[in-house]
Amino acid sequence: MKSEILPTIIKMRDTGVLRMNKWKNFKAALCLGIAMSMAVVSTVSANVTGPSAGPGLETGQNPGQGQQTQQSQTGSSSLSRLPALSGTVTTSQGNGTTGTAGINPSQGTASGSLETPVVASQGAVLYDALNNRFLFEQNADTRFYPASITKLMTALLVLERSSLDDTVTFSENAVTNLEAGAVTLKIKAGDKFSVKDCMYALLLKSANEVANGLAEHVAGSVSGFADLMNQKAASLGCTNTHFVNPNGLNDSNHYTTARDMALIAKAAFENQTLSQIASTVSYDFPATASVPTVRKLTMGHKMVNPANGEYYQGIVGGKTGYTSLAGNTLVTCAERDGKRLIAVVLKSKQTHYTDTKALLDYGFAYLAAEQNPAGGQQSGQQTGPGGTAPSSPAGGPGANARDANKWIQNGQIWQFVKADGTYARNESMMINNEIYHFNNDSQMVTGWNQIDGIWYFFRNSGGLAKTRWVETNGMWYYVDDNGSLFTGGTTPDGFLVDENGVWVQ
């Protein structure tokens, strides 16, 4: 194997002798080198995590603003650059701030005649939970404040680590560690409730002191519980999520993305107890000495209540959220005909229900067309570069493209036809604000690829991955804000990687 195609093999000294300081480093380098040189990363998780929940925000920044961190000065910044672009294209699909239908081209098979939904919320995804694919993305990897949809993670952890019959005793800190205007049930220090009662208060009323009490019950402290939340998020594949509290109240270091939230929601709604609670319309919360009457809690998510005009047929459950900084946030899970979809919208200005309905309607129509494509153009259909090829299926990155500048799918292979009728080949292109690379066979690449001496990682959707950790053959690697493999230094989120790019544990 030629050393020039293995950036992770330790460089030759001037004498030509291979430097091997540690067998572990050589083994790590060789494993990644083989994987990269074959352009196959069979062990890379579909949604990868890193040694932390993801790069931290810079001081003074808010989630969703300036989330691309600067590369550490101790790293190989001289080798960090974006791939040279041969062109920038905006198809009729949009410019990346509008939604992208069927983001995973390797899985897109439905009719290309479906219109991509128009979503006003700043961040949104539609997730096919059974097939682990995203059917729609809009700023899917941008960090936002989640607000109370955080409580889905809280609920999941509590159910995994305690019994519904356990008793939660509320501390002074639990009932007072809240911001002004936070939703509460006016629980007092010393009040005791079952975990079951608290779970309904958490998911129906969205009571913030209840989240604190549950966190202390499970982990002994809010901060300890936040650590568990971050560990769980990483285990679910979240790469841009960090929690500091169990309720979602504003904190500059408490953030998530639409993509990550969909992964959390998938796990949450796979828990039958959580799904049952999150789909309950009302619940009688027991009286206390301070509030001597039984209180009827009603579900805040309007799509769950059959008596509400927003009710959605097939609803599994959901969670609302709102703070002044987060805006409206909403997570919704629905299932029809054995097909389960999860819609996540973030940073909405009161369009969260309209956006969610549009996403779910689109998703179920998409899946129906995929199952029975007779009513539309089937995937894989294509003509030559100069012909009148149909638009790519809704599952492709070029969904709804027309005439020039269009995606073409051939089986599992994606290609791009440029304005002059030729296929993109041996080049990198910016298409709808995403960078893609095409090899000598005009095929869109995925996984690790070397371009002009630098290694880059391209997601399953084909888009260039940036500021994230990638697991390959049991080892962790970091790609920086240019998408370049980071080597020989400390990553922006504070982890040391060796000269081969391997995280030093």
Image (cartoon, helix red, strand yellow):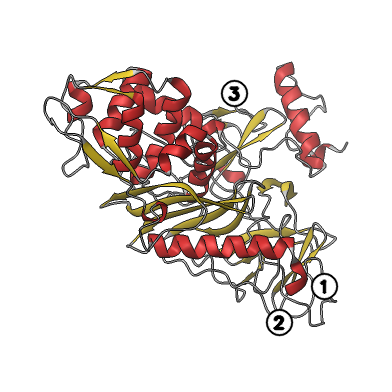
Location of mark 3 (residue): 504
Q: Are marks 2 and 3 in contact (CB under 8 Å)?
A: no
Location of mark 1 (residue): 382
- Residue occupying the point 60% across, 76% down: 92
Res 196 label? none
Dividing the image into 4 quarters, which one contains the N terminus? Answer: top right
Q: Is residue 60 left or right of residue 471?
A: left
Question: Vertical placement of 304 versus 383: above or below?
Answer: above
The amino acid beneath tag 1 is Gln
Which structural element holds mark 3?
loop
Which structural element holds mark 1?
loop
Question: Vertical placement of 216 versus 44: above or below?
Answer: above
Q: Nearer the viewer, residue 335 or 328?
A: 335
Question: Vertical placement of 279 versus 26: above or below?
Answer: below
Question: Closer to the N terminus: mark 1 or mark 3?
Answer: 1
Q: Are marks 1 and 2 in contact (CB under 8 Å)?
A: no
Q: CA distance from mark 2 to mark 3?
A: 49 Å
Location of mark 2 (residue): 403
**Where does residue 241 sit, x and y in percent of width and height?**
45, 40
Q: Are marks 1 and 3 in contact (CB under 8 Å)?
A: no
**Where does residue 2 sit, x and y in percent of width and height?**
86, 38
Q: Is residue 173 left or right of residue 462?
A: left
**Where does residue 131 sit, x and y in percent of width and height?**
67, 47
Question: Vertical placement of 372 versus 290: above or below?
Answer: below
Q: CA distance from mark 1 to mark 2?
A: 13 Å
